[in-house]
Image: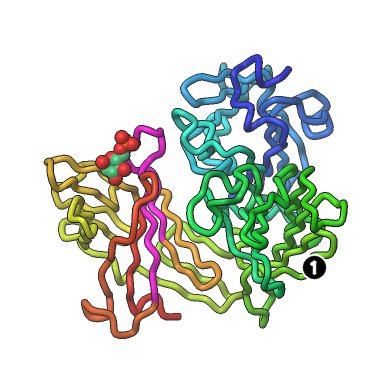
Amino acid sequence: VTGQTTGVPSDLCGHTWEALDDEKNVHYKINLCESLPTSDCKGTECAISAHDMKENTFQSVGTLPAQFGDNVLVFNTTESCPGSEHKIQSVINLLCGKSLGTPEFIKYDECVHYFEWRTFPACKKNKFKPIKEVPCYVFDSDYKKHDLNPLIKTSGGHSVNSWDHGSDLYINICRTIGTSVGNTSSCPPKSAACLIKDGKAYDVGQPKSALASYEKDRLVLQYETDNKPDFCNGHSPTVKITFSCPSSGIEVTDPKLTASSNCRYEVEWVTENACHTDYLESDNCTLISKERGVLIDLSPLREKPASPYHAQDPKGEYMYYLNVCDKISNGECLGDSVSSCQKIMSTTLSKSAGSYKNQTLRYSDGDITLTYPGGEICSSGFQRMTVINFICNETAVNAGKGVPEFQSEADCTYFFSWQTKYACL
Ligand code: M6P
């Protein structure tokens, strides 16, 4: 059975995805378009398997074909749910996201396994569809998730430090550079690695296969292309990017070119983004990591919901109301869990730009960010989202608490910076 026949977005086919219920210790494999090996599914074929890691048992929790409509995928089974009339099922709710993303386990209720997946095929009008993108996360042998989605640029690339001053290498992560602006504006849109040499831009690698891991705390992404620039001595360029999670005492770095003979580029990037996600993220207002010697607590920034912080954009078009790790209720953006509200000054309208329910506090490579997803939907299908970057300032205004400052908007994601003593570690 193929995905095409059921209308499953083809961008999500061709890969076995993984998700984790870390409370119950269940590891899921998900293939929307082709059956998994029977060894994953207790002897039958299935599309979604659940591996109970405590009991070491496997179970089919969904078979093909999926029913697909309104961005919801439903996978049925023929197995009865003990103590009820219905059957074991899985439901995946697709939401518009700016990259391929990853399926996330949400809950298990009455034999139904629920997942949520923020992914570009769920957006309207192909809004964030790249030329090519590959899955950008892995589960390691300890079933810990490593996710490089935060490094993906919607378009453009990261600059690679190189010893060769005559040329500049740019890489996007897991995704093509696309039609971009700035330094990569002359790059071939289908390249994910682009070399600018003597003022000319060359495609030196396109994404083909998913991010992989062959060794603990090291992730590898490989790009290739059929394009053969003259300076490659007859070879087709390849790019191998190795990401490593810094172990104690090792500093994070920018992406660095470590080899480049005959256009075989090797890039090394020591970044905490390569570490497992539970080391980097928290779903509440504190982030404690003994291993890293990190203790972040943003709860002193929380204000009364009726008197939230406010910030205006430089043009004065919008006023934003924000709270930290809590809701706002100042009469704008009605809703019971709005944490970021955008008031449109020329009208009486206001839009929720995100909620503290499902918020993420993340500390990676020195950056503290708080993300509020789940705001009101834009015409692309993307739910407005707020990202606040907290910066250490021991002498911040407002008795050291500081205030949010609006930075920019990119396709219904709103970025703020916030200097505060509570970001000093
Ligand atoms: C409003 C504001 C903007 C946003 C725009 C999106 O004007 O919320 O920040 O970019 O809506 O408009 P649309 O839904 O038409 O894409």
Pick whichever, 72 or 263, lies toward us: 263
Q: Is residue 147 left or right of residue 241?
A: left
Within the image, what quadrant is residue 286 found in? bottom left
Q: Position of residue 134 (x, y in %)?
A: 67, 43
Residue shown at the point (77%, 30%) measured from the top left: 36
Instruction: Please give the count of numbered marks on the rendered protein.
Output: 1
Residue located beneath label 1 in the image: 259
| Relative to 68, residue 339 above or below | below
Q: Is residue 199 left or right of residue 406?
A: right
| Residue at the far bottom in the pictured view | 395
Q: Is residue 245 among what the camera can see? A: no
Residue 30 on the magenta segment: no
Q: Position of residue 179 (x, y in %)?
A: 53, 44
Q: Secondary structure at mark 1?
A: strand
Q: Is residue 358 left or right of residue 206?
A: left
Q: Is residue 152 left or right of residue 236?
A: left
Residue shown at the point (69%, 49%) measured from the top left: 203
| Residue at the far right in the pictured view | 234
Residue shown at the point (58%, 18%) measured from the top left: 67
Q: Amino acid at mark 1?
A: Ala
Ligand 1 found in image quarter: top left
Within the image, what quadrant is residue 425 found in? bottom left
| Relative to 9, residue 179 above or below | below
Give the extent of the magenta segment. Answer: 370-391
Pick whichever, 254 or 233, lies toward us: 233
